Amino acid sequence: MLYCADCGSPLHFSTGSNTSGKDPRYICGGYRKRSAEKYCTAHYIRQPVLEELVLENLRQIVKLATEQEKEFVRLIMNYTLSKQQEDVKTLQKNLAPKEHRILELDRII
Ligand SMILES: [Zn+2]
């Protein structure tokens, strides 16, 4: 669910264990796999910081939903509509080569 903002690689969980104890964090997968195409720097986000950011974001969403319900519904509707339009474009893009293949197979048969 977590991706690096710089390289797009998934973030990997690390207990962050060392001599001073544990410091759980999420590290960029592009850094851990140095041989990968998506090489990235050694950055990470600490778990407590991430949890606080997610919690704060959820608070803002709940606040908007309760204080400005109509605006919240409008935003959700717009997001849903644009997501559905994206999905349709992707499906249509994937459909063309498959239709072409069906025609090829029909000719072969
Ligand atoms: Zn990265």
Image (cartoon, rainbow, N blue to C red):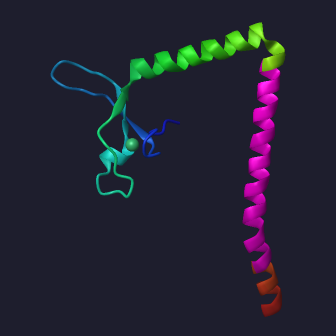
Q: Measured from the top left, where is residue 8 in percent x and y? A: 47, 45
Farthest residue to the bottom: give it. 108
Left or right of residue 77: residue 52: left
- Vertical position of residue 105 compared to residue 63: above or below: below
Snapshot quadrant of residue 29 = top left
Which stretch did the figure color magenta? 72-100
Q: Measured from the top left, where is residue 48 in percent x and y? A: 40, 17
**Of the pair 61 and 108, the residue shown nearer to us:** 61
Snapshot quadrant of residue 96 = bottom right
Q: Quadrant of ligand 1?
A: top left
In the rendered image, the quadrant that contains the C terminus is bottom right
Q: Measured from the top left, where is residue 90 in percent x and y? A: 73, 56
Farthest residue to the top: give it. 67
Say which residue appears at 68% left-offset and 9% top-offset: 63
**Of the pair 46 and 20, the residue shown nearer to us:** 46
**Of the pair 63 and 46, the residue shown nearer to us:** 63
Say which residue appears at 32% left-offset and 45% top-offset: 31
Q: Measured from the top left, where is residue 40 in percent x and y? A: 34, 46
Say which residue appears at 77% left-offset and 86% top-offset: 104
Would you say residue 25 is visible in this rendering? yes
Magenta-drawn stretch, dominant element (helix, strand or loop)? helix
- Is residue 96 magenta-colored? yes
- Vertical position of residue 42 compared to residue 16: above or below: below
Left or right of residue 90: residue 103: right
- Vertical position of residue 5 compared to residue 85: above or below: above
Would you say residue 109 is visible in this rendering? no
- Is residue 20 magenta-colored? no
Task: Report the number of discs.
Answer: 0
Say which residue appears at 39% left-offset and 53% top-offset: 38
